[in-house]
Structures are given as C-alpha cells and as structure tokens.
Amino acid sequence: MNADYAGKATRTALARLNSSLTTDQLAALASAVTGGESPAQAAAAWLRAEGLVH
C-alpha cells in the first residue's frame, strides 16, 4: 500500500495480516463469499480464527 494513503498503524496492521493470510486461506475466503457469506462475515470469522480480533 502506498504510504501516501496509509499511516504507520495501517501499514503495520496490513503487514500483520500479510504474514498470516496464506493463498489457501484466501481461496477459502473467496469460496465462502461465492457460497453466499458476506465478505464482512467471512473476514470477521477468519480474523477471529487467527486470533487477530476478539
């Protein structure tokens, strides 16, 4: 992400996600959305499963 558009906290959070999100997990998220789950629901479930949010 271009530093002009994101502050340090945003870049740090994205780096943390990048180190946790695998290609297989991304495919599973896409499949969940294709299957009818909202992107927000799929993302929230993944974040909770990874211990990134409570």
Image (cartoon, rainbow, N blue to C red):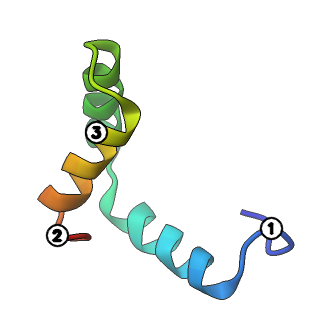
Q: Amino acid at mark 1?
A: Tyr
- Callout 1: few (<14), some (14-19), or many (20+) C-alpha neighbours within 10 Å? few
Task: Classify 48 as above or below 11.
Answer: above
Q: Say which label, 1 or 3, has the lower sequence index.
A: 1
Q: Amino acid at mark 2?
A: Gly
Q: Amino acid at mark 3?
A: Gln
Disc number at residue 51? Answer: 2
Give the residue at mark 1.
Answer: 5
Q: Marks 1 and 3, how far apart in space?
A: 25 Å
> With 15 as the anchor, is 9 left or right in this view?
right
Q: Position of residue 34 (x, y in %)?
A: 34, 14
Residue found at x 80% / y 75%: 3
> With 35 as the anchor, is 11 left or right in this view?
right
Task: Classify 33 as above or below 51.
Answer: above
Assign a secondary structure to mark 2.
loop
In the picture, which quadrant includes the N terminus?
bottom right
Q: Position of residue 50 (x, y in %)?
A: 18, 62
Residue found at x 32% / y 49%: 22
For discs 1 and 3, the disc positioned in front in the rendered view: 3
Total count of labels: 3
Q: Nearer the viewer, residue 22 or 11?
A: 11
Residue found at x 25% / y 58%: 47
Assign a secondary structure to mark 3.
helix
Give the residue at mark 3.
Answer: 41
For discs 2 and 3, the disc positioned in front in the rendered view: 3
Q: Nearer the viewer, residue 28 or 42?
A: 42
Q: Say which label, 2 or 3, has the lower sequence index.
A: 3
- Tell me where residue 4 sits by quadrant: bottom right
In the picture, which quadrant includes the C terminus?
bottom left
Task: Classify 44 as above or below 48.
Answer: above
- Tell me where residue 52 sits by quadrant: bottom left
